């Protein structure tokens, strides 16, 4: 029986962590013909418990983007004698020469800098990331991406044949936890964004668009939900300095609170300049929120006709798109119906089946 190793060091996080959670769950349901070894960080060893006897977990002590990863993980993989290794991210030991499948979710790190990091350190890390991504793309037996946009982007970036790349779309979860109101937002009209605040998320322009909308919608509030890190604190400082009212930073929200926000928002705004899939917007659609979205990168591919689009570099156009959804109930209802239909097009089951097919082809099964 052939052995497949899955590097699940991102398990438990957002984005790649969500992808891994569902991939592992569905693979256990559909594959009894291969043996799997799942590599987890020490903190996640108790978070994932295999339910299929062909799956086992193994602790991996090597952090991403480190020298230890390049040497220690390389040695660990060699000792496992895998027939195939799946890296759900570009970070991997470049010296490893066994059969590899790599998922590249996007190339945002190559294109945007992170001001929360020291400039010199970030520049060096970005150069290393770019080099590792190129090596990974070229040495991998097969590549996976979340969208056709990223597939084409990776093919151009790494100069690899697009036939080597398979698109495995993600899917939106339905929150089962009972909705729980967020403090001070009941009976309040608000628009919302949930997620991380990196520069490519374009929250500065969202704030500018909100100031324009406030001129005609004085009671409206903007809710920014997400863990309060250094980047959120920088945005909050700018807002406080400019004395912009009615912008609420909720900090981390649990599943029940997030469901309540989705179900009560006037619209979910996704102003991003670059995405690999855009899962938050699809999740918002799945919970009945009308979505107003940037037309950048893969977002029109994922959202189809179920969003009101705008140019993310045009603040006035963003404000007009938001106002249109708020002011026109017919358009809002249309987006809600289209959004639920769009979200239902995607399936974690199908994603796992496509991934397994790539494994089998790489193994020569």
Image (cartoon, rainbow, N blue to C red):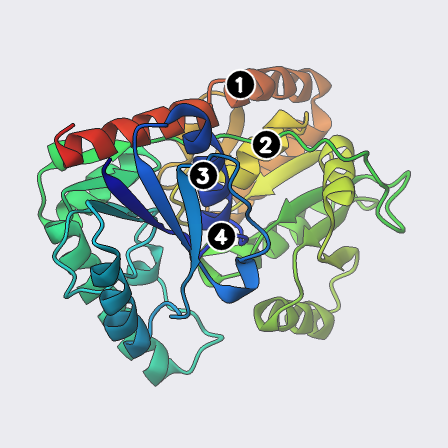
**Cβ atoms at labels 3 and 4 below 8 Å apart:** yes
Q: Which disc number belongs to residue 68?
A: none
Cα–Cα span, label 4 and label 1: 25 Å
Which numbered mark, 2 or 4, is in the foreground of this view?
Answer: 4
> Residue at the location (66% across, 61% down)?
227
Residue at point 16% right, 27% down? 365
Q: How many numbered dots are placed on residues in this image?
A: 4
Is residue 87 shown above or below 240? above
Q: Position of residue 203 (x, y in %)?
A: 56, 56
- Rounded to the nearest whole Å, what is the CA distance between mark 2 and mark 4? 16 Å
Could you say whether the residue bearing mark 2 is in a helix, strand or loop?
Answer: loop
Identify residue for label 2.
Answer: 173
| Mark 1 surroundings within 10 Å by alpha-carbon count, few (fewer than 14), some (14 through 19), many (20 or more) | few
Depth check, mark 4 against mark 1: the one in front is 4
Q: Is residue 339 visible?
A: yes
In the rendered view, does 161 fall on the left or right side of 268?
left
Disc 4 crowd rating (10 Å Cα; few below 14, some 14-19, many 20+) is many
Badge 3, how many Cα within 10 Å: few under 14, some, many 20+?
A: some
Dot 1 lies on which element?
loop
Q: Earlier in the sequence, mark 2 or mark 4?
A: 4
**Which callout, 4 or 1, points at the residue further toward the start of the chain?**
4
Residue at image location 47% in from the left, 20% down from the top: 305
Q: Which residue is mark 4?
A: 11
Q: Which residue is mark 1?
A: 344
Residue at point 37%, 81% (across, down): 119
Q: Are marks 3 and 1 in contact (CB under 8 Å)?
A: no
Q: CA distance from mark 3 to mark 2?
A: 15 Å
Q: Where is mark 3, residue-wise?
A: 24
Q: Quadrant of residue 266?
A: top right
Q: Nearer the viewer, mark 3 or mark 1?
A: 3
- As measured in the structure, the alpha-carbon distance from the residue carrying label 3 to the one carrying label 4 is 10 Å
């Amino acid at each position: 029986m052939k052995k497949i190793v899955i590097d699940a060091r991102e398990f438990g996080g957002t984005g790649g962590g969500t992808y891994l959670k569902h991939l592992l769950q569905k693979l256990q349901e559909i594959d009894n013909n291969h043996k799997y070894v799942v590599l987890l960080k020490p903190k996640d060893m108790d978070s994932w418990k295999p339910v299929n006897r062909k799956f086992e977990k193994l602790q991996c002590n090597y952090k991403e983007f480190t020298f230890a990863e390049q040497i220690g993980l390389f040695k660990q993989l060699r000792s496992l004698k895998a027939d195939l290794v799946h890296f759900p991210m570009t970070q991997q030991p470049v010296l490893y020469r066994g059969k590899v499948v790599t998922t590249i979710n996007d190339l945002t790190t190559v294109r945007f800098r992170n001001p929360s990091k020291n400039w010199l350190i970030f520049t060096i890390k970005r150069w290393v990331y770019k080099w590792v991504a190129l090596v990974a793309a070229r040495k991998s037996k097969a590549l996976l991406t979340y969208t056709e946009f990223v597939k084409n982007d990776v093919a151009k970036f790494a100069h690899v044949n697009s036939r080597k790349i398979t698109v495995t779309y993600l899917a939106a979860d339905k929150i089962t936890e009972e909705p729980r109101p967020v403090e001070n937002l009941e009976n309040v009209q608000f628009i919302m964004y949930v997620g991380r605040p990196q520069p490519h998320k374009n929250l500065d322009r969202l704030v500018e668009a909100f100031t324009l909308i406030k001129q005609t919608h004085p009671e409206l509030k903007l809710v920014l939900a997400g863990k309060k890190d250094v980047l959120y604190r920088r945005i909050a400082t700018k807002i406080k300095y400019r004395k912009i009212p009615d912008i609420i930073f909720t900090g981390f929200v649990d599943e029940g609170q997030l469901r309540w926000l989705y179900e009560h928002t006037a619209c979910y705004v996704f102003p991003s300049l670059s995405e690999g899939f855009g899962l938050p917007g699809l999740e918002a659609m799945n919970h009945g929120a009308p979505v107003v979205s940037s037309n950048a990168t893969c977002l029109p591919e994922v959202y189809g006709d179920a969003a009101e689009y705008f140019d993310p570099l045009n603040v006035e156009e963003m404000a007009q798109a938001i106002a249109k959804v708020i002011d026109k109930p017919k358009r809002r209802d249309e987006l809600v119906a289209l959004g639920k239909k769009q979200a239902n097009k995607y399936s974690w089951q199908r994603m796992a089946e496509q991934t397994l097919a790539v494994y089998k082809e790489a193994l020569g099964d």
